[in-house]
Image (cartoon, rainbow, N blue to C red):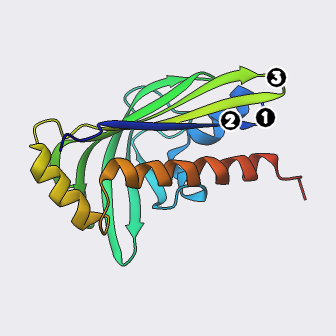
């Protein structure tokens, strides 16, 4: 069965595109919204996101934890933020290779911003049968596309709730 190589979803957030971009383009904060990510450590120069910025993401699914090495590929304030995941490992990202690309697009709409999150499977060299078998073990029975579709929805809903919460 051929793999679905990319999935995305959108949500409208009652906030300005630049504000939403500022929140999502900080990889150290992603753990606030993502069901798997636990934050990140930026390597090298810290500050606003920039193309070429490298960070190590900390992740957890059930009892399993891992670290990914990521590089920012797009940092267009208020419009687009993207990064590619290109190494993975238990404590340190030692296994190198194309893994995935994550992209966030921001579009001004009446009263807010449409945020679109997209996951793309970069494991193009993997035969579909091998990838599907691996995915079902890693996600407890699902393809990564189906699994990421749910993760994206959760992330977007949490982001919306955080950005629209009244200041206390």
Q: CA distance from mark 3 to mark 1?
A: 10 Å
**At x 24% / y 54%, what residue is drawn?**
88
Looking at the image, which residue sits at the far bottom? 63
| Residue 99 visible in the snapshot | yes
SS at badge 1 = loop
Q: Which residue is mark 3?
A: 110
Q: Which residue is mark 2?
A: 20
Q: Is residue 50 above or below residue 69?
A: above
Q: Which residue is mark 1?
A: 15
Question: In terms of depth relative to the viewer, which is nearer, 60 or 114?
Answer: 114
SS at badge 2 = helix
| Residue 56 visible in the snapshot | no
**At x 34% / y 42%, what residue is drawn?**
70
| N-term-proximal mark, 2 vs 3 | 2
* Callout 1–callout 2 Cβ contact below 8 Å: yes
Q: Which image quadrant is residue 47 in?
A: top right
Left/right placement of residue 102 relative to residue 85 reads: right
Q: Which image quadrant is residue 118 in?
A: top left
| N-term-proximal mark, 1 vs 2 | 1
* Callout 2–callout 3 Cβ contact below 8 Å: no
Looking at the image, which residue sits at the far front? 1
- Could you tell me which quadrant the C terminus lies in? bottom right
Q: Which mark is residue 120?
A: none
Residue 159, percent across and down?
Answer: 66, 48
**At x 56% / y 49%, what residue is drawn?**
153
**At x 56% / y 33%, what residue is drawn?**
116
Crowding near the residue tagged with mark 1, few <14, some 14–19, many ≥20 C-alpha atoms within 10 Å: some
Residue 10, percent across and down?
Answer: 59, 36
């Amino acid at each position: 069965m051929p793999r679905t190589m990319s999935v995305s979803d959108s949500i409208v957030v009652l906030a300005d595109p630049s504000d939403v971009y500022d929140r999502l383009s900080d990889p150290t904060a992603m753990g606030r919204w993502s069901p798997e990510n636990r934050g990140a450590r930026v390597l090298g120069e810290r500050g606003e996101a920039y193309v070429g910025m490298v960070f190590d993401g900390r992740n957890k699914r059930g009892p399993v934890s891992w670290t990914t090495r990521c590089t920012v590929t797009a940092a267009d304030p208020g419009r687009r933020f993207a990064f590619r995941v290109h190494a993975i490992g238990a404590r340190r990202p030692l296994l190198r290779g194309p893994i995935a690309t994550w992209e966030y697009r921001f579009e001004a709409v009446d009263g807010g911003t449409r945020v679109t999150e997209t996951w793309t499977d970069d494991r193009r060299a993997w035969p579909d049968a091998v990838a599907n078998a691996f995915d079902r073990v890693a996600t407890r029975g699902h393809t990564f596309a189906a699994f990421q579709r749910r993760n994206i929805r959760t992330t977007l809903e949490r982001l919306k709730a955080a950005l629209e919460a009244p200041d206390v």
